[in-house]
Image: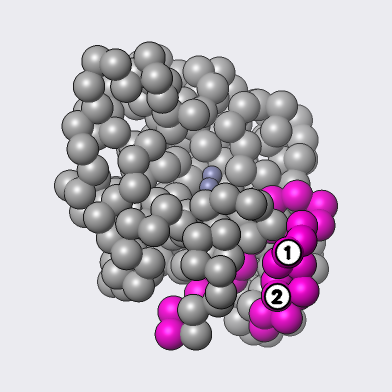
Amino acid sequence: MRLFDADLHVHTALSPCGADEMTPPAIVREARRRGLAMLAICDHNSARNVPAVRAAAGGDPVVLAGIEVTTAEEIHVLGLFGDDEAALATGEAVGATLPLAGVASRRHYGAQTVCDAEGRAVDEERRLLAAASGFPLGAAVELIRRHGGLVVACHLDRPSFSVFSQLGLWPADVRFDAIEISAADAAPPWREAVRALPHPVLRGSDAHCLDELGACRSRLRLAAPGFSEFALALRGAGGRGVA
Ligand SMILES: [Zn+2]
Ligand SMILES: [Zn+2]
């Protein structure tokens, strides 16, 4: 087993709040420069830029397919998948519950650019990715699981869009594979509650611009970077784990 640095929460120019500079080749270049062995591309409510980032990376870094679903309660939940089709299908189901983006929303929320591997704009997503989906938390988790995904409760240290900020408690009937912290330490009032959770703790940058990429990262003990190794690490199997 070896240690690998991974940033498993990265946005692209597809996210309305993602900077235009977050194109596939720019993300790959910056990830290599910062020594990241693995990335997960997790745009809001869509996985349409995952294939382009993977193509741009050519295996360095390894790119996992992901999506950051906004539930009906405005909780952010990551789904991480072993293949693009599963992530894209999850995004399709989520997208079907989103309103269409009007002309004004590009100005208000930002562009939603679908890129090719060279970073060229090939499409503009028509659904408003900034909106809350029609999936309540339990249904969103079930949707991700149905597509074979792993479920991560996002940025539990943040004062908004987290399980604690939106619900004020930890839902005992929802099964998460991991929790995520996106800064150095969990902020009150949830610090103790986060520490008490039994889940593996991932650290993801939630990067929306190049400067943020890898600023917060997980160190994973794996045989090699990849989805199946990552899934085993979350279970602590065979000496793997989150360091
Ligand atoms: Zn988020
Ligand atoms: Zn995010």
The type of residue carrying mark 1 is Pro
Q: Toward the viewer: 19 or 4?
A: 19
Q: Quadrant of residue 213?
A: top right
Residue at numbered disc 2: 193
Do the residues bearing badges 2 and 1 touch, measured as CB atoms within 8 Å? Answer: yes
Q: Residue 189 carries which label?
A: 1
Question: Residue at the spot x=38%, y=14% of the render?
Answer: 107
User: Is residue 163 positioned above or below 102 on the image?
Assistant: below
User: Is residue 133 positioned above or below 57 on the image?
Assistant: below
Question: Residue at the spot x=46%, y=26% of the render?
Answer: 13
The type of residue carrying mark 2 is Ala
Q: In which quarter of the image is residue 44?
A: top left
* Horizontal side of residue 46 vs 65, given as left or right: left
Please rate how many residues cluster around mark 1, counting C-alpha atoms within 10 Å: few if below 14, some from 14 to 19, many from 20. few
Question: Residue at the spot x=81%, y=57% of the render?
Answer: 185
Note whether residue 16 is visible. yes
Q: Quadrant of residue 236?
A: bottom right
Q: State the image coordinates of residue 220 (x, y, percent, origin top left).
A: 72, 63
* Horizontal side of residue 97 vs 22, given as left or right: left
User: In the rendered structure, which segment of residues is drawn in magenta?
Assistant: 173-198
Q: Which mark is residue 94?
A: none
Q: State the image coordinates of residue 26 (x, y, percent, origin top left).
A: 59, 23
Note whether residue 89 is visible. no
* Beta carbon at label 1 within 8 Å of ligand 1: no
Q: State the image coordinates of residue 196 (x, y, percent, origin top left).
A: 73, 81
Overall secondary structure of the magenta stretch? loop
| Magenta stretch contains residue 10 | no
User: Is residue 148 positioned above or below 123 on the image?
Assistant: below
User: Is residue 36 positioned above or below 210 on the image?
Assistant: below
Q: State the CA–CA distance, disc 2 to disc 1.
A: 8 Å
